[in-house]
Image (cartoon, grey):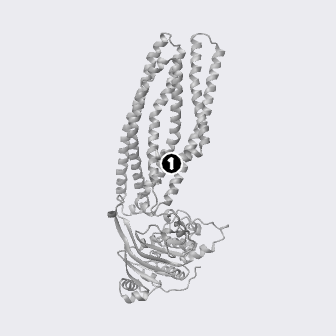
Amino acid sequence: MKSINLIKPYIAEKRFNLLIGFVCLIATDLFQLFFPRVIKWTIDDITAYRIDLAGLSVYTLYMVGIAVMIGLFRYGWLICFVGMARRVEEGLRNRLFEHLQTLSASYFDKTKTGDLMAHATNDMQQIRMATGIGIVTIIDTIFLGTAAIIFMAYINVRLTMFALIPMPFIILTSWFFSRKMHRMYSEVQGTFSTLTEAVRERFAGIRIIKAYTAESRAVAGVSVISEDYVDKNLKLVRITGSYSPMIAFLSSLTFAIVLYIGGRQTILTTITPGDFVAFSTYLGLLIWPMTAIGSVTNLIQRGKASLDRINAILETRPAVHDIPNAKPVRTLRKGIVFENVTFSYEKDIQKDDSDSRFSAISGIDIRLDQGMTLGIIGPPGSGKTTLLSLLPRFYDVSGGRILADGTDIRSLKLRDLRAMISFMPQEPFLFAGTIRENITFGKIRPESPEQEDPELIKAVEAAAMYDTIKSFPDGFETIVGEKGVILSGGQKQRIALARALMRKTPFLILDDPISQVDTETASIIINTVRSLSRLRTVMIVSHRVSAVQFADQIITLKNGRISESGTHDQLMRHGSYYAKMFSMQNEAAGLPQFRFSKCNLR
């Protein structure tokens, strides 16, 4: 029942529409209940030879009028209830997406994208059906069924009692099967999520699949999951397939009872032929709610299973969040300090105990004053990216603390903290829009196409991407496609860098910004970063050692720990990892080092 509370606010917002729909639905049922009375009057008058053509025409007009009113009121409740269900779907989907935005990076490390897509599509559809048609069917079943029984009892109480004999069996059957259906629906929708993720992953990796001629293996992998999905659906069909015929049998049994006993009473003139036909018509109106118990149970159980799955996500609390009374922050003036910082990732996403975690970094002590540049190098897997992810609090430290202007960043407002930081990830991500939209990230466009934002131009030039963009036929309005598919790796990386440089923040984090560009372009980019010295506090990771040689402080990470720290000259004299990598890379490139030149980006 707790899951039902999710949709109550959205239904409450549309309570006026719901009231109008309820009135229209009741009016539709009342006219349906009046229909058999007209049939009774017509048949009784015909069999008693007390009606002429004029009277028959009046009854015909009654029935036409009733049919018109039923159509009008049915249109009314369809608009109100179906519209309300669509609004519920919209509100719940928006709430789900908004909540997902608040969850931490660790949640998405453990959750498949396909699973979330299934929640936002298939589950929402099931909730909509249960909320709209499900509510209509419940109201219709209760009101129309009760009213039909009353009208039947008005005609003949004894016949009504016989007609209701199968009712307890219908109720017990519905209760028994509903429990099984809820469990099976949860399994089916869980498998649908797995299938969605499998298809999404193979579409995203279609170029790799083609490059390795692995199409048959990709198809086979999806086929296995698809077969499991079909098997679970077939199990569900066996349950629903047994349930619906059983309900239909019990409903037909009611007709058989009425046909025999009612027909006998008509022959014995206990009831009139008109009463018998009207009773049978009311029974037809009652049979629909009795049969609808099956379909409404089906709808409600599907919706309930989907609602439970959505509720499980909405009840998930972000691992990284604002503490009570978190402090606002508008600027960073005194720099950043890492004090004995340790962080561990979860090793097994199915577990949540101390044994399921492994240490990524430990014992990190760094002091980075405002305007300083910190260079970070180290072999793959040494914890460089992890270290960068801790400052904007994509993850919270497992031990120690990070201080910003002397305050633990966990006590600062998360949104304010991230607003102080420009971040360029190791793997650049581009949205399927234009180059301009990706760099400005939603900022207002110029009033005219000819007018270019000088800040945009400056950021693109600093990222060594201006000439390349101008070479495209559509320039900044070039559509990059999904994940920037039309661009090379280096071009995507430079657009991501321009996006970071576009934000005027006191702190800049660059995770390997020159890994996919040539030496000349890398030199321009590093000159740009160097020009930011004293203007911004910079943390830069690079596998090219020469790219960090200008930094005020350089650290080497090894197995999650700082193995050496100092300036370029100090580390070269030390003769350890930094010095060896610097010499090896320069010998391979045939260059002594990057040539630095002046570049202003203010």
Callout 1: SS = helix
Q: Residue furthest front?
A: 325
Q: Which residue sits at x=62%, y=33%?
A: 72
Query: Which residue lies at the image location 47% right of the left edge and 13% below the top edge?
Result: 265
From this view, report whether residue 25 is shown above or below residue 229: above
Residue depicted at 66% across the width and 71% down the height: 451
- Viewer-nearest residue: 122 or 135: 135
In the picture shown, does residue 218 fall above or below 86? below
Residue 591 in view: no
x and y percentages locating residue 60 in the rendered image: 62, 21
Whether residue 130 is situated above or below residue 68 in the rendered picture? below
Quadrant placement of the C terminus:
bottom right
Residue 130 versus residue 100 in the image, above or below: above
Q: Quadrant of residue 384?
A: bottom left
Residue 135 location (% of width, % of height) = 52, 38
Q: Relative to residue 572, is residue 72 drawn left or right?
A: right
User: Splitting the image into 4 quarters, where does residue 442 fall?
Assistant: bottom right
Residue at the left extreme of this rendering: 355
Three-letter residue code for mark 1: Leu
